[in-house]
Image: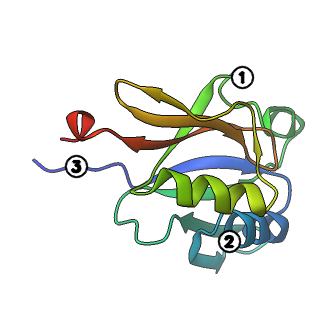
Amino acid sequence: MTQNLAAIALLVDDYDAAVAYYTGVMGFELLEDTPHGLGKRWVRVAPPGSTGTSILLARASTDAQRARIGDQTGGRVGLFLHTDDFDRDYHALSARGVRFREVPRQETYGKVAVFEDCYGNAWDLIQPSSAALP
């Protein structure tokens, strides 16, 4: 049996604003934007060159969902962006206004720094060490 994780839903307040942020600031690619009636859309983005899991930008539609925007993981880092060139991406993201919560640090698993997206979700930018790669 073969399985893979196709997408992770991320609550957002507005489709167009989220697409603009993830494509313009984060540099992700818009993979799909399909209307589903009644204002709902199936919107997927992913880092450039990614062949794995995408992010489904899911517009919050209830008060309970809106309350969770930016805090789906209780303040913990919940999204992990791997890169083949940490310094390139750290500087590019910083230049486009991404707020890093810390300075880059070297860990046994690679070079890493925590940043926030426009909603306050915590991400790790990681360049895995060769020992950490499968």
> Rounded to the nearest whole Å, what is the CA distance between mark 2 and mark 1?
24 Å
Q: Nearer the viewer, mark 2 or mark 3?
A: 2
10 Å crowding of disc 3: few (<14), some (14-19), many (20+)? few
Indicate which disc, 2 or 3, sits on the residue closer to the N terminus.
Answer: 3
10 Å crowding of disc 1: few (<14), some (14-19), many (20+)? few
Q: Amino acid at mark 2?
A: Thr
Residue 29 in percent (x, y) is at 56, 74
Please indicate whether residue 57 sits to the left or right of residue 110 in the image. Answer: right
Marks 2/3 in contact by CB < 8 Å: the verdict is no
Residue 70 in which image quadrant:
top right
Q: Which residue is mark 2?
A: 23
Q: Secondary structure under badge 3?
A: loop
Q: Secondary structure under badge 1?
A: loop
What residue appears at the point 47 percent right and 42 percent down from the top-left corner?
A: 126
Please indicate whether residue 128 sits to the left or right of residue 27 in the image. Answer: left
Comparing 8 with 1, the one in front is 8
Comparing 123 with 8, the one in front is 123
Q: Which residue is mark 3?
A: 3
What residue appears at the point 35 percent right and 59 percent down from the top-left corner?
A: 52
What residue appears at the point 74 percent right and 32 percent down from the top-left corner?
A: 101
Q: How many marks?
A: 3
10 Å crowding of disc 2: few (<14), some (14-19), many (20+)? some
Any mark on residue 75, and which?
1
Please indicate whether residue 35 sits to the left or right of residue 79 in the image. Answer: right
Q: Secondary structure under badge 2?
A: helix
Q: Nearer the viewer, mark 1 or mark 3?
A: 1
Residue 84 in percent (x, y) is at 39, 57
